[in-house]
Amino acid sequence: MQIFWEIEVTDNTLAVDSEFLAICSAMSSEGGKEPTGISYGVTTNGQVITVGNTGYEPVLAIRSAATYKGDPNVVVARLKSFGLYSDDDISYRLVWFPDTVTGGTWVPRGGNSSIEYNVNPTSITGGQILDEDFIDATDTGSKKQGQSIEDVLSQQEVVCRTADNQGSLMMVLLAKSEAGTSTVKASMKWVEDIG
């Protein structure tokens, strides 16, 4: 929040030399930004994706649609969580702002969401790695093994777009097998500030 003062001459017939002194100021607030919005999520829709061990492969991606309700999309969305599930040991990366995402099909999330998703794109270039880790499949002791990572970057606005740069900011979840090949399922959840 900002405070400013302004001196304005309202009568141009008077030649007045003005001076304003401010000793202090105070502002009252009820606190910081209150997270609000509508929650959405997507999964790989039961599709099991096979990843190899030679490099990270994209599994699931989200991005802002070009328009929202007929206007340029300027809705801000915050990633809340993502999940990865595999019967094998895998490594993963969460990449923000890749230069390109190729392959797969961008599908509107629906339900009044401003986000599109892509299950199993074929490749990405560039981007910033926001999170990177290893999932040990033996930790759960069951056939359906994996790990869900909650509240990653929950307060950062990591998916948004500007009216002049369609879909340039997006998130991609990538995985790599620590065995020969592994099957993976994935999910992403976010909150949109429609306001």
Image (spheres, rainbow, N blue to C red):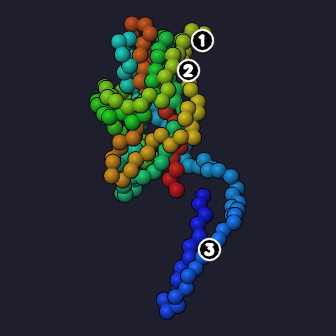
Identify residue for label 1: 139
Residue 144 appears in the picture as rendered: no
Q: Is 72 left, or right, of 27 in this rendering?
A: left
Q: Cα distance, mark 2 to mark 3?
A: 61 Å
Residue under numbered circle 3: 20
Q: Residue at x 37, y 21 (%)?
A: 57
Residue 82 lies left or right of residue 26; in this view the side is: left
Instruction: Pick whichever of labels 1 and 2 is earlier in the sequence.
Output: 1
Q: CA distance from mark 3 to mark 1?
A: 68 Å
Secondary structure beneath label 1: helix
| Residue type at the position of mark 2 | Gln
Residue 18 position in % (x across, y down): 58, 79
Residue 65: x %, y % from top left: 37, 46
**Residue 88 place in picture, x, y as percent:** 48, 11
SS type, badge 3: loop
**Of residues 4 and 85, the one drawn nearer to the viewer in this rendering:** 4
Q: Residues within 10 Å of mark 1 (few under 14, many from 20)?
A: few
> Which of label 2 and label 3 is nearer to you?
3
Residue appearing at x 47%, y 35% in the figure: 42
> Does residue 112 lie above or below 178 as drawn?
below
- Badges 1 and 2: C-beta atoms under 8 Å apart? yes
Per the image, the residue denoted by label 2 is 147
Residue farthest top in this picture: 180
Q: Quadrant of residue 179?
A: top left
Q: Would you call the spot at circle 3 few (<14 residues within 10 Å), some (14-19), or many (20 or more)?
A: few
Q: Residue at x 52, y 16 (%)?
A: 135
Q: Residue at x 29, y 30 (%)?
A: 103
Q: Earlier in the sequence, mark 3 or mark 1?
A: 3
**Considering the numbered disc 2 on the image, is that residue within a helix, a strand or a loop?**
strand
Q: Residues within 10 Å of mark 2 (few under 14, many from 20)?
A: some
Q: Amino acid at mark 1?
A: Asp
Q: Earlier in the sequence, mark 2 or mark 3?
A: 3
